[in-house]
Image: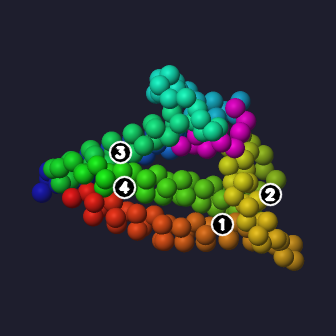
Amino acid sequence: MGGNYFTQAVLYLIEVVFDLYILAVLLRYLLARVRADFYNPLSQFLVKVTNLPIKSLRRLTPSLFGIDWSSIILLFFLQGLKIIILTLITSGHIPVVSGLFVLTIANLLKIVIYVHMFIIIIQVVISWINPGAHNPITIIMHQLSEPILNSVRRLIPAAGGFDFSSMVAIITMEIMIILLVSPLMDLGVRLSY
C-alpha cells in the first residue's frame, strides 16, 4: 500500500517538472509569435530557462515560414518523453508510436488552450479589481491574448458598452477542448496499446 503512495508522489513530481518546463518553452514560443517585448523581465526569464536546448536545436533545424521549429520540436520531444515515462511507470510498457504522436498533439493543444484561457480569465479579474494596471506580467498577458480577443471582436462587436469577447473566447476554447482535444485523447489512448 505504501509503495502506491510513493508511486503517486513520483508521478506527480514528474508531471510537475515536465509541465513547468513545457509551459516555459510554450510561453517563449508564443511570446515570439506575437512579437512581445523581448526586454520584459518575464521574457528574459523564459529565454534564460529555455535557451540551452533551443539554441542546440536551432543548429539542426532552421526557421521556416516564420515559425521557430526548434521550439516546436522541443515541445513535442518533452511532451512525448513525459507520456513515455508516465506510461512506463503506470503500466510497464511504452506506448505505440502512433498513439504517442496523437497523445502528444492532444496534450500540447490542451496546454495551449488552457494557457490562453487562464490569461484571459486573469485579465478579466484584473480589469475588475484594478483596471488600467500596468506591470511587466499584465503587458505580456495583453500581448498574448489580444490576437484572440481581436479576432472575436471582429465577429462580435461590443454591445451597449459591454465587451463580450473574453466570454465568447473562453466558451469557444471550452468547446474546442470538448470537440477536438478530448476525441484526440481518446484516439491516442486507443492507438497506444
In this orientation, does residue 139 appear? yes
Residue 52, placed above or below residue 114: above
Residue at coordinates 58% horizontally, 66% vertically from top-left?
173
Q: Secondary structure at mark 1?
A: helix
Residue at coordinates 18% horizontally, 54% vertically from top-left?
91
Badge 1 crowding class, 10 Å Cα cut-off, few under 14, some 14 to 19, many 20 or more, is: many
Residue at coordinates 48% horizontally, 71% vertically from top-left?
178
Contact? badges 4 and 3 (CB < 8 Å): no
Quadrant where the N terminus is found in the figure: bottom left
Stretch in magenta: 26-38
Badge 3 crowding class, 10 Å Cα cut-off, few under 14, some 14 to 19, many 20 or more, is: many
Label 2 vs label 4, nearer the camera: 4
Q: Amino acid at mark 2?
A: Pro
Q: Earlier in the sequence, mark 4 or mark 3?
A: 3
Residue at the spot of label 1: 169
Nearest the viewer among 160 and 84 is 84
The residues tagged by marks 4 and 3 sit, at their Cα atoms, a distance apart of 8 Å
Q: Amino acid at mark 1?
A: Ala
Is 30 in the magenta? yes
In this orientation, does residue 6 appear? no
The residues tagged by marks 1 and 4 sit, at their Cα atoms, a distance apart of 24 Å
Image coords of residue 33 (percent x, y): 65, 42
In the displayed orientation, state which residue is furthest to the bottom: 160
Nearest the viewer among 105 and 88 is 105
Q: Amino acid at mark 4?
A: Leu
The residues tagged by marks 3 and 2 sit, at their Cα atoms, a distance apart of 40 Å
Residue at the spot of label 2: 131
Residue at the spot of label 4: 103
Residue at the spot of label 3: 80
Image coords of residue 98 (percent x, y): 31, 53
